[in-house]
C-alpha cells in the first residue's frame, strides 16, 4: 500500500477568498493529485484583513500537525506568510517540498510590509535540503510576475516556473503544480546513495 502524502494549502487573503477563489485552485489540485494525496485546506482567520501574528500562529499549528514528508503550498499572501513562517522557525518534521504560487515578495524590491518582511537571504533561512518551487502566471495583475524574480534572487535553490497566459489564480488550473509535486515527492522517497 502506498503512503498518502499530506499537502497543506495556505489560502490567499481578501474577502471571500477561501470560498470564492482559492477553493477552485484546491479542487484542481485534488483532482490532479488523486487519492495518494490528502490536501488540507484550513480556513485562516480574518481573511479580509490578515495579520501576520494571527495567520502565522495558525500556519505554525497546521504545519505542526503534518506528518514527515508533507508538502506545503502557499497562494498569494498565504505564500508570503508561509515562507516567512518557515524561515522564522523550521518545522519539527521534515517537509518534502515548499511550493509558492503567485506569492508577493514582501520586502526589498517587492511590496512594503506592515507586519513582516522577507529577508534577502530567505533561502538560507528556509529548512535545509527542502526543495522550493515558485509558480507565477505571467498575466498576473494582482502580484506582478517580477515578484517571482525576487524570490529567485532571495532563494537561489528555488526552481521558478513562469506560466504564460495565466492569471493570479493560474486560471484555477494547478496541473503543472501537481506534476511537480508528484515528481518531487517520488524523488524524495527514492533511496539516495
Image (cartoon, rainbow, N blue to C red):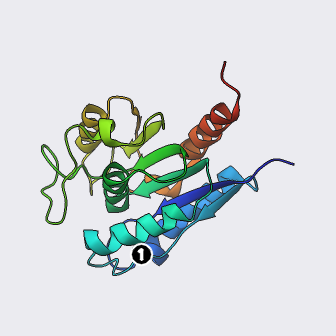
How crowded pointer 1 is (Cα within 10 Å; few <14, some 14-19, many 20+) is rated as: some
- Choose between 99 and 123: the one closer to the eye: 123
Measuring from the top left, give residue 164's x and y in whole percent: 40, 38
Q: Is residue 120 left or right of residue 164?
A: left
- Choose between 49 and 175: the one closer to the eye: 49
Measuring from the top left, give residue 157's x and y in whole percent: 38, 29
At a point 37% along the width and 42% down the height, the residue shown is: 126
Q: Is residue 183 left or right of residue 131?
A: right
Quarter of the image for the C terminus: give it: top right
At a point 37% along the width and 57% down the height, the residue shown is: 82
Furthest residue to the front? 92
- Tell me: residue 37, above or below residue 52: above
- Tell me: residue 75, above or below residue 187: below
Furthest residue to the top? 193
- Tell me: residue 178, above or below residue 38: above
- Tell me: residue 76, above or below residue 3: below
At a point 54% along the width and 60% down the height, the residue shown is: 8
Measuring from the top left, give residue 146's x and y in whole percent: 23, 40
At a point 59% along the width and 42% down the height, the residue shown is: 181
How many marks can you see? 1
Circle 1: element type: loop
Measuring from the top left, give residue 30's x and y in whole percent: 65, 59
Furthest residue to the right? 1
To which residue does mark 1 refer?
Answer: 44
Snapshot quadrant of residue 67: bottom right
Amino acid at each position: 500500500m502506498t503512503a498518502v502524502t499530506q499537502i497543506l494549502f495556505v489560502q490567499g487573503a481578501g474577502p471571500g477568498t477561501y470560498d470564492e477563489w482559492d477553493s477552485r485552485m484546491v479542487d484542481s489540485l485534488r483532482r490532479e493529485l488523486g487519492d495518494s494525496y490528502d490536501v488540507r485546506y484550513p480556513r485562516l482567520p480574518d481573511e479580509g484583513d490578515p495579520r501576520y501574528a494571527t495567520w502565522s500562529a495558525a500556519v505554525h499549528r497546521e504545519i505542526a500537525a503534518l506528518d514527515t514528508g508533507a508538502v506545503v503550498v502557499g497562494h498569494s499572501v498565504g505564500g508570503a506568510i508561509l515562507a516567512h513562517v518557515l524561515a522564522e522557525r523550521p518545522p519539527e518534521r521534515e517537509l518534502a517540498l515548499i511550493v509558492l504560487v503567485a506569492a508577493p515578495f514582501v520586502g526589498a524590491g517587492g511590496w512594503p510590509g506592515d507586519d513582516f518582511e522577507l529577508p534577502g537571504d530567505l533561502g538560507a533561512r528556509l529548512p535545509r535540503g527542502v526543495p522550493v518551487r515558485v509558480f507565477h502566471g505571467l498575466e498576473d495583475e494582482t502580484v506582478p510576475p517580477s515578484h517571482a524574480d525576487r524570490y529567485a534572487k532571495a532563494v537561489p535553490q528555488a526552481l521558478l516556473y513562469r506560466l504564460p497566459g495565466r492569471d493570479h489564480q493560474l486560471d484555477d488550473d494547478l496541473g503543472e503544480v501537481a506534476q511537480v509535486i508528484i515528481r518531487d515527492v517520488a524523488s524524495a522517497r527514492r533511496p539516495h546513495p
